Image (tube, coloured by chain):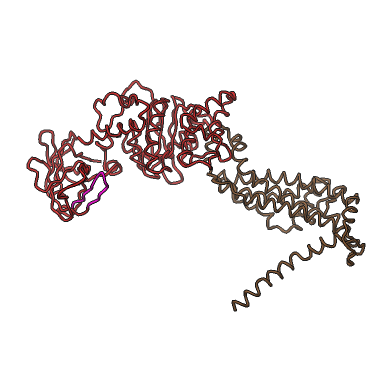
C-alpha cells in the first residue's frame, strides 16, 4: 500500500543523498508493528526499564494571563530524534527555552538525566541550543564561534584547535574557518551554528526551527545531514518546528502540540495514519473529516452514518463506540480513489462532481462536490506522462475508499 | 514662486550658516593675527599659539580640564552602560518608570539649576570643592547622554546572542564582556567622546562646583576675557574648538558605523 511505500521512499532518498556513507540502523530491519515509515529498530519509549534523558513532570508556564504550557508531562530518551511540532504560539519554543534555562517553569519539574534543573543557570546545563536566528557572534570568525563554548570549558589550546577542526570537517566548512558570519551564505551560517552547538558534545542538542531560514532544496538536503550527524554522534536531538514535513522526515517521535498541551505523542507513521483526534488529523497533512454518527458494528467494521456521503460508510476500527455516538471519519486524500464508473467491488462509494483540479506535477488533487454540498479531496499520483482521457471539471466520478483506509475520531 | 524659492533657499541657508558660524570663523582667523590689537589685522602669525603654550596658568587650566574630562567621561560611559543595560535587559522592575525619568532628567534640566543644586549638596555635606566635585558634576550631567546613546544600540541588539553565549557556558558577566561589550563598543566610544567634549566646554556647572586649584580651561578663558580680550585667548579658544569638533566628528562617525549583519 502507498502508506507503507512512503516510508521506504524517504529512507531511499536518504541513501541517494549520502551514497558514500552506508546508512546504518535506519536502513536496517523493517519495523515490527509500525505504521508508515519505520526507520530503525529503535523504540526505547516502549521499554518500561529505559530511563528518560529528559523528563518534564507537570510543567506549567504562564506569561501574564496567557497559558504557554499547561501541566505537561513528557519523556525523551537517549539517542532519540524528537520533534516538538505545532503552530506558532502552541508553547513548543517555551518548552525548549525552559530546558535550556532561559525560562523558569511556574510549576512542575524538569529533569535532565534524573537531575532536577530548577535553579541551574543556562551556562551550567548539559544542553546546547542551536538558535533560530543562529545567533552567530558577528565579531568572531567561524573558527572562533565554534571555539567559544570550548574556551568556556577551559580546555587546552591544542585540544580546542583539534575539536574545532573536527567540527569544521563534520559540517564541511574547513576552508571557511577564517571568514566572519556576514561573509557566509544562509546555509553555511546554519552549519556554523550547528557545529558551534555540537562542539561541547552536549548530551542533548536543542534545535529551534533549524531549517526555517533555508530554501526548500537546501532544507531537504540538510534534513538528511542532520539525521546522519545525529546518528553518528548518538546524541539526543530535540527539534522545535512548525513544519510537519521536516518533523515527519527526521523524527523518531513527534509530539504534536496545541495550546500548551500535547495533542498526540507518537511515531511519524502513527501520527499520520492513526491520528488521535481531529486537531492532529487536520494539522498533519491533508485530510477529509466526515462528521457522522455510529450506527452499529458488523464483524470488525463500524457502520457510520455520514450525511455528507448520503449514506453509511464502513470503517475498520476497534474503537469502543456506542451506537448514536457523534464521530468523525478521517480519510487522507491519497487513500481515496476515483473512477468514472461505479467500482463494483468497492465498499464505500461516494458519487461527486469534479469541482477543482490542482496539478502538482507528481500528484494531482481533485476536489469533488458531493450531493449534500460538502467537498471531498482526493489525490492521485501521476504515474504516466500522458493520459488519454483525463478526468476533467464538472465530470461526475465515483470516489471510493477501503474500510481500513479511514480512521474513526472521537476527540 | 518656485523660481523665487529656488533663488532664496541658498540665501537663507547661507544666512543661517553665517549667523551660526561666522563668529567662530572670525575668532579662529583673529587667532592668527600678528597684531597685539584685537581689531586690527597685522598679518598672519602663529605667535599667539606660541605665547599660549608658554602661558602657565592657561596651560595648567587646560590640563585640569583634560583630566576632568577623561575621568568624568570614563565614569559616565560605565554608568551609562549599566543604566542602559538595566533598562533594556531587565524588563519590568519596581521603580522602573521613576528610574527612567530620573536618568533622563539632566537632559532637560537647566545647567544653572544643576550647578546650584550640586553646590548646595557639596556645601551641605561639607565636601571640599575641587577636582573631584567637578568630576562628579560632569559625570552626573553627561551620564544621561551616554545612556541614551548606548541604549539605542542595545535596543537593536539581538538578545539571542547573549543567550547563545550563556548557552555555550559563559556566565552572564563573561557573556557581557565577550559578546555584548565588543558589539556595543562603537557606541560606548561615541558616548565617551560626547561626554568628554561636554566636560571640556562646560563653564556654568564648573563655576559652581569648582574650588581652588581646579580652575578649568573655560573658567580661565572667561576670567581672562573679563580683563580684556587678548589674541592669546583667541588661540586658546581655537584649540578648544578644534578639539571639540574632532571629538564630535569621531563620535558621529562611530555612531553611524553599522556593523554589517548584526544578526
In this picture, residue A204 sits left or right of residue A329: right
Residue A158 on the magenta span: no
Chain in brown in the render: B
Q: Is residue A30 above or below residue B260?
A: above
**Quarter where residue A13 is shown:** top left
**Quarter where residue B233 is shown:** bottom right
Image position, residue A229 (x, y; %): 41, 29
Identify the residue at horizontal 17%, vertical 53% (top origin).
A392
Q: Is residue B150 above or below residue A221?
A: below
In this picture, residue A349 sits left or right of residue A111: left
Which residue range is magenta in the image?
A357-368
Image position, residue A51 (x, y; %): 38, 23
Chain in red in the render: A
Image position, residue B223 (x, y; %): 87, 58
What main secondary structure does the magenta stretch of the protein show? strand
Q: Nearer the viewer, residue A13 or B169?
A: A13
Identify the residue at horizontal 43%, vertical 25% (top origin).
A233
Amino acid at each position: 500500500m502507498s502508506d507503507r511505500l512512503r516510508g521506504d521512499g524517504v529512507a531511499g532518498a536518504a541513501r541517494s543523498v549520502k551514497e558514500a556513507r552506508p546508512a546504518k540502523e535506519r536502513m536496517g530491519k523493517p519495523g515490527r508493528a509500525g505504521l508508515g515509515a519505520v526507520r530503525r529498530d529503535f523504540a526505547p519509549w516502549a521499554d518500561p526499564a529505559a530511563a528518560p534523558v529528559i523528563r518534564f513532570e507537570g510543567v506549567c508556564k504562564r506569561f501574564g494571563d496567557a497559558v504557554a504550557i499547561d501541566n505537561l508531562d513528557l519523556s525523551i530518551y537517549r539517542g532519540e530524534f524528537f520533534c516538538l511540532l505545532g503552530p506558532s504560539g502552541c508553547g513548543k519554543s517555551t518548552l525548549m527555552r525552559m530546558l535550556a534555562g532561559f525560562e523558569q517553569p511556574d510549576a512542575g519539574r524538569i529533569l535532565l538525566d534524573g537531575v532536577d534543573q530548577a535553579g541551574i543557570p543556562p551556562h551550567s546545563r548539559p544542553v546546547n541550543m542551536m538558535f533560530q536566528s543562529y545567533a552567530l557572534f558577528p565579531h568572531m570568525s567561524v573558527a572562533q564561534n565554534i571555539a567559544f563554548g570550548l574556551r568556556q570549558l577551559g580546555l587546552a589550546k591544542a585540544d580546542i584547535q583539534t575539536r574545532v577542526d573536527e567540527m569544521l570537517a563534520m559540517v564541511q566548512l574547513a576552508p571557511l574557518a577564517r571568514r566572519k558570519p556576514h561573509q557566509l551564505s544562509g546555509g553555511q551560517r546554519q552549519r556554523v551554528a550547528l557545529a558551534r552547538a555540537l562542539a561541547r558534545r552536549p548530551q542533548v542538542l536543542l534545535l529551534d526551527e533549524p531549517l526555517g531560514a533555508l530554501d526548500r532544496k537546501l532544507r531537504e538536503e540538510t534534513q538528511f545531514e542532520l539525521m546522519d550527524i545525529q546518528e553518528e554522534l548518538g546524541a539526543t536531538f530535540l527539534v522545535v518546528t512548525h513544519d510537519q514535513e521536516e518533523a515527519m522526515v527526521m523524527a523518531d517521535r513527534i509530539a504534536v502540540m496545541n495550546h500548551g498541551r500535547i495533542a498526540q505523542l507518537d511515531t511519524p507513521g502513527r501520527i499520520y495514519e492513526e491520528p488521535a483526534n481531529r486537531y492532529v488529523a487536520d494539522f498533519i497533512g491533508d485530510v477529509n473529516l466526515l462528521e457522522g454518527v455510529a450506527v452499529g458494528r458488523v464483524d470488525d467494521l463500524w457502520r457510520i452514518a455520514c450525511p455528507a456521503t448520503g449514506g453509511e460508510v464502513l470503517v475498520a476500527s476497534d474503537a469502543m463506540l456506542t451506537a448514536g455516538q457523534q464521530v468523525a471519519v478521517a480519510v487522507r486524500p491519497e487513500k481515496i480513489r476515483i473512477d468514472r464508473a461505479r467500482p463494483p467491488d468497492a465498499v464505500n462509494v461516494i458519487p461527486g462532481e469534479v469541482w477543482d483540479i490542482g496539478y502538482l506535477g507528481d500528484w494531482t488533487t481533485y476536489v469533488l462536490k458531493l450531493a449534500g454540498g460538502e467537498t471531498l479531496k482526493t489525490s492521485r499520483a501521476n504515474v504516466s506522462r500522458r493520459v488519454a482521457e483525463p478526468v476533467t471539471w464538472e465530470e461526475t466520478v465515483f470516489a471510493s475508499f477501503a474500510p481500513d483506509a479511514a480512521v474513526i475520531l472521537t476527540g | 514662486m518656485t523660481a523665487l524659492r529656488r533663488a532664496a533657499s541658498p540665501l537663507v541657508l547661507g544666512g543661517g550658516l553665517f549667523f551660526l558660524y561666522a563668529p567662530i570663523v572670525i575668532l579662529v582667523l583673529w587667532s592668527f593675527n600678528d597684531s597685539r590689537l584685537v581689531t586690527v589685522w597685522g598679518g598672519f602669525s602663529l605667535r599667539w599659539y606660541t605665547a599660549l603654550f608658554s602661558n602657565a596658568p592657561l596651560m595648567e587650566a587646560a590640563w585640569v580640564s583634560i583630566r576632568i574630562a577623561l575621568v568624568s567621561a570614563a565614569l559616565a560611559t560605565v554608568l551609562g552602560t549599566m543604566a542602559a543595560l538595566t533598562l533594556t535587559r531587565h524588563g519590568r522592575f519596581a521603580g522602573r518608570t521613576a528610574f527612567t525619568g530620573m536618568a533622563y532628567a539632566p537632559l532637560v534640566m537647566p545647567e544653572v539649576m544643576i550647578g546650584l543644586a550640586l553646590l548646595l549638596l557639596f556645601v551641605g555635606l561639607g565636601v571640599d570643592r575641587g577636582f573631584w566635585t567637578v568630576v562628579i558634576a560632569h559625570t552626573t550631567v553627561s551620564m544621561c547622554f551616554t545612556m541614551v546613546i548606548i541604549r539605542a544600540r542595545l535596543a537593536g541588539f539581538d538578545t539571542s546572542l547573549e543567550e547563545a553565549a550563556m548557552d555555550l557556558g559563559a556566565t552572564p558577566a563573561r557573556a557581557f564582556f565577550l559578546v555584548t561589550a565588543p558589539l556595543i563598543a562603537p557606541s560606548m566610544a561615541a558616548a565617551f567622546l560626547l561626554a568628554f567634549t561636554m566636560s571640556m566646554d562646560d563653564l556654568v556647572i564648573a563655576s559652581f562646583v569648582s574650588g581652588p586649584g581646579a580652575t578649568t580651561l573655560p573658567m580661565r578663558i572667561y576670567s581672562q576675557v573679563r580683563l580684556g580680550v587678548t589674541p592669546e585667548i583667541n588661540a586658546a579658544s581655537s584649540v578648544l574648538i578644534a578639539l571639540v569638533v574632532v571629538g564630535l566628528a569621531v563620535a558621529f562617525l562611530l555612531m553611524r558605523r553599522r556593523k554589517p549583519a548584526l544578526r
